[in-house]
Amino acid sequence: MNKLSLSTLFLLCSFTVCFGQYSAISSPAGFDTFIEGIPHGRLDTISYASKTVGTNRKAVIYLPPGYNVKKKYPVLYLLHGIGGDEFEWLNNGKPQHILDQLYRDKKLTPMIVVLPNGRAMTDDRATGNIMAADKVEAFSRFERDLLDDLIPFVEQKYSAMTNRENRAIAGLSMGGGQSLNFGLGNLDKFAWIGGFSSAPNTRAPEQLLPDPATAKSKIKLLWISCGDQDNLIKISERTHEYLSSNGIPHIFYIEPGHHDFKVWKNDLYQFAPLLFKGDK
């Protein structure tokens, strides 16, 4: 793993990192609620042309408090689950409130957060049989939509940094699998990667990282987490075991909880402050 700042090292060393289990302090009460009288980020809804899908697609953008077009910001792409869309995090996870409070507490590097629709198909609504083959395939197709269409749009429209060291991807469940698949599969594009309760769409570890030595030199942060009562925990465990056996530094965080937003909100609260620290 590349060099980190002293503050980040302190955070990391307060947990069991790299090859053991991460033990975080619980998120404080009310960490996901709206607070009056503090600076707030801004939410934009965008529409971008997707060559991959052949239509215009939507995403939501969170801009940090005090966003200034004269500055450049790193970007986190935050993905939803199989039953969600670009509004799932906003409706159930309140990331804007979590991030606002982290900024208030001076725990975050200012960043742009992109909440896309990870179902890359013409009708990308989470309706009908969400497990239908074409809808599941659309989650895989989103890799091209993300890399070829959404990222270039965001970097043209917003004051975003454009190098891999300033680009992160993370997500929950199906979006966790996408984040590991797309992030580790494109280390020329992403340096910071997180999988929250990653689903069975997650590639086998040997496919995720067939070249451990190269991965070690490129990954800034690799986060694997899951609730201890989650039926999908074996997906995270097998990834952790492979990473450990191949000496790939990572955070493995097993927390109390099931497959739900109580876990995922806490994941975001713990994960976001670790992003974009150290050498750029």
Image (cartoon, rainbow, N blue to C red):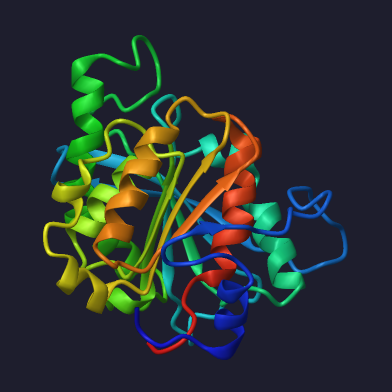
Give how far across and how far down residue 196 sits, in percent: 47, 45
Question: Is 154 drawn above or below residue 219 in the view shown?
Answer: above
* Residue 150 visible in rendering: no
The image quadrant that residue 214 belongs to is bottom left
Front residue of 60 and 3:
3
For residue 277, side relative to residue 31 (left or right): left
Q: How many marks?
A: 0
The image quadrant that residue 203 belongs to is top left
Question: Is 16 drawn above or below residue 13 in the view shown?
Answer: above
Give how far across and how far down residue 19 sits, in percent: 42, 62
Q: Split into 4 quadrants, where in the image is the C terminus? A: bottom left
Question: Is 9 drawn above or below residue 47 in the view shown?
Answer: below
For residue 209, side relative to residue 239 (left or right): left
Front residue of 276 and 222:
222
* Residue 69 visible in rendering: yes
Front residue of 146 and 13:
13
Question: Which residue shows up at 32% across the image and 28% down it?
Answer: 124
Front residue of 14 and 26:
14
Residue furthest top in the image: 128
Question: Which residue shows up at 40% across the image and 88% down it?
Answer: 3
